[in-house]
Image: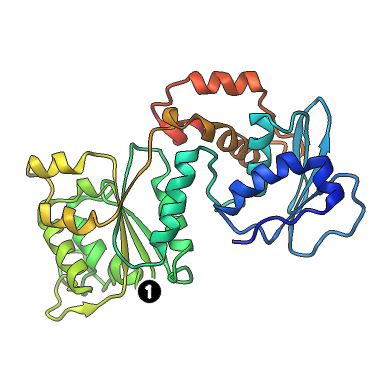
Amino acid sequence: MAALALNDKFARQHGSLVNRAGAIAASLFDCSAIDVRDMADAAPLRSGARTISLTRDHVPALGRTGADQIGMTYGDPLSEASLGMLLAAMAGPEDPIAADAESLSIFALAERLAASDIPVLINGPTGTGKEVLSRFIHARSDRKNGPFIAVNCAAMPEAMLEAMLFGHQKGAFTGATQASEGFMRAADGGTLLLDEIAEMPLQLQAKLLRALQEQEVVPIGATHPIKVNVRVIACANRDLPAEVAEGRFRADLYYRLNVFPLTLRPLRERPDDIAPLAFAMALRHAPDQARVPVLSEGALAMLKLHQWPGNVRELE
């Protein structure tokens, strides 16, 4: 992924902050379409680039100044607030955001995993960003131009989950007035995210295992399998080994999914992620996009003291 290129004058003015943020951002998303410049720079804007204009002042400020343009005023280039603001400004709406060393190592590992088609199991409490990490893996894979289908196994009635996953033929059951291809076939050539996999009924777990092993599905009412080319990412907020021990999750499916597990910690255990996440959410939700609320170092310190039982979802 391309990193930022700084000229000498700009580096003297803003280099200490921009180099820190740029190194982190380049590990998470492509920076080639990002221009970071001094606010006094009168050079024409690069077409198609997201532009961030910086200035130094003791009163920090953040706001959108136009389409794909953000203005940022900061004081201390070494402060956590300045780094969080700039990371949030650099990230696009679909880009992951992190600054915690362990979080960054998870994304680095996920990028290496993206090159393969092996199943991935992501563990972590609810609201820690498991779907964000799943989308990151998909975006860095050879499947990035294919579909990404996210399915919450806990949000669907048990009686419907099989039909929605594997599809069904017209008339296969009461109410099946037309055929449906199902999520696995819809994700053909791409990635299927199975969130809250521990909620899947045991009988359906067996059918999922066969689909993973054979890379084929048999829609309800059909007699012949249909080949699919799908990479599966499963997410769990429960302790799956404990679920296996209690007989609530199939051991063979667990071993099939657990080829290379990734674990996301609760937000309270990665406090360095709080500042960039908070500023990103402020940019996303501020009613007045020209004057986005700026968190002080004191406010960030208070946020770090909170336990965040709802994790990133609670912060948003």
Residue most toward the bottom?
Answer: 224
Location of mark 1 (residue): 189
Which of the 4 quarters of the picture holds residue 218? bottom left
The colour scheme of the drawn protein is: rainbow
User: Taking 201 as reference, is 119 above or below it?
Assistant: below
The location of residue 47, given as percent across then percent down, is 79, 65
The location of residue 48, given as percent across then percent down, is 74, 64
Front residue of 109/61: it is 109
Count residues near mark 1 (Cα–Cα under 10 Å), then give few for <14, some for 14-19, many for 20+. Answer: some
User: Taking 95 as reference, is 73 above or below it?
Assistant: above
Q: Is residue 176 left or right of residue 229?
A: left
* Mark 1 secondary-structure assignment: loop
> Residue drawn at (90%, 57%), measured in percent from left and top?
43
The location of residue 86, given as percent across then percent down, is 68, 41
The answer to whether one can see residue 286 in this image is: no
The answer to whether one can see residue 100 in this image is: yes
> Residue drawn at (42%, 60%), measured in percent from left and top?
112
> Residue drawn at (74%, 60%), measured in percent from left and top?
49
Front residue of 92/20: it is 20
Front residue of 76/214: it is 76
Front residue of 159/293: it is 293
